[in-house]
Image: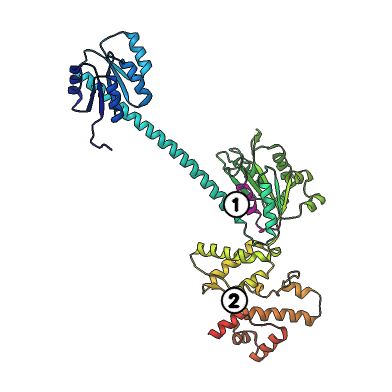
Amino acid sequence: MSTGKLPNVLLIDDEEHSLASMRMALEDEFDCLTATSADEGWRLMEENYVEVIFCDQRMPGKTGVEFLTEVRDRWPETVRIIITGYTDTNEMIAAINAAGIYQFLTKPWHPDQLLMAARNAAHLFQLSRDHDRMALEMRYLASRAESQLEERRRALRDGLGFEKVLRAPNSPMNAVVMLARQYAGFDVPVLLTGEAGTGKTALARAMHYTSLRSDKPFHELNCAGMTDDLLEVELFGAKRGALPGLMSNRLGLFQKADRGTLFLNGVDTLSPAMQLALLRVVTEGRYQPVGGHETQATNLRLIAGSHGDMRALVAEGRFRPDLYYALSVAEIAVPPLRARPGDIAVLCQHMLFDVASAHGKPVHGLSDAALEFLENHDWPGNLKELENEITRMLILAQEKVLGPELISRHILQAPRGDNDTDRRADAVLAGPGTLKDRVEEIEMRILRETLTRLKWNKSRAAAELGLSRVGLRAKLDRYGIAQPRQCAEQEEEA
């Protein structure tokens, strides 16, 4: 943005009338500084911000070329123009090379010629300054962009890293995460084993985002239930015309995950043909797209997931031993949720607030009594079953703190503090013990579930169960079923 100030031009000539003529030609558009010697001109350069210099070549003491050479070393951005009464070409070439002269004018010069030279020189000076400023800004912006990119990558790694594997301080998952961290930095195949829903995908993703491939893509695919034809297209891709209606080439995950990571879950369900095809990719890094004849290469890191016991499958002849050993350079067993009862509270609270945020229903948390029931369940569906239960409780909740009355009946009917026992009702019915023992076990579960669901309203519970209040109390005393302290306190306050 212009400030209205005219550009400064320094005029140097040992003849006063020449200086006066140059000033007269330029003073309408420039602030003119005049000097009759190189030394006086140097002093003016030190005291003023000079954009253009017009300097005579023949002067007592230093010549114009000598002076402008020194100026270039001190003020290289100033545009230097020399004026000479001589037309020796060799001398002018030497002057231009020695002093970095922008232009030379010969005497006698015309005022319009001088003015045009000054305008062009001032414009060149401004362009040079703009270029330097833009170059500086570009370096700053490039450095800032690189820094912001690294910050985003770090945030991505932090947001998708092992911090996403939620667990309590003394969780069995701590050893699993520690092992996965060690393997993450080494570019080798990893086999994750464990039941469906135990969090193998989150663990694989965390390993990717803490590896050297973290700035490359991460892809995942669950092979369970997929036919070979569908798997081939998903993994290998397909050429145009290879499938009905396919009008262009389709990229497969082996190509999409090139230089990145592919998590292939459910490898224990692969057919013999797909096992052989996968073996070639793992050992050679090569594959053929569906409908193609050329072999393509991929440089991906494969993390495999298995729901079953891979060693047992190999022993039974249902899984290729060479593929198993190729996949299991590192093998990590992920424990089921029932082996992590101490993690339930952490997982429940995190899931609850995530679901509440997603559905726009604010809550304060889960009551201790609710957590006790949730911690007591086996969770055969693991994390997904737990998330479904938390979501259902949130939908049904009428208060900010979610109580046990919102929990599904089969969870409420589970006995307490017996982690080694199958808690399902059908297991009780078909299990050992006398008829009386088994009936009492079922009756005790129904009593506890009904009272919990009805917030320990004994009148309503007795009516629902077809009992009198006295009969209900007698059964509670018989089975040692006591009302939780929290419910009792709420009842007293009411």
Label 2 SS: helix
Q: Is residue 204 magenta?
A: yes
**Distance from the alpha carbon under mark 2 to that under mark 1:** 36 Å
At x 57%, y 51%, the residue is 158
Residue holding disc 2: 405
Write down the region rendered in magenta. 194-211
> Residue sitting at 52 percent across and 65 percent down?
356
Which amino acid type corresponds to the residue marked 2 in the rendered image?
A: Glu
Residue 437 visible: yes
Task: Identify the mark nearer the N-term, 2 or 1.
Answer: 1
Residue located 57% across and 49% down the image:
157
Any mark on residue 144, and which?
none
Indicate the position of residue 324 as horizontal and vertical percent values. Answer: 76, 46
Q: Amino acid at mark 1?
A: Gly
Above-or-below relation of 124 to 218 = above
Relative side of 90 to 341, left or right: left
Give the residue at mark 1: 161
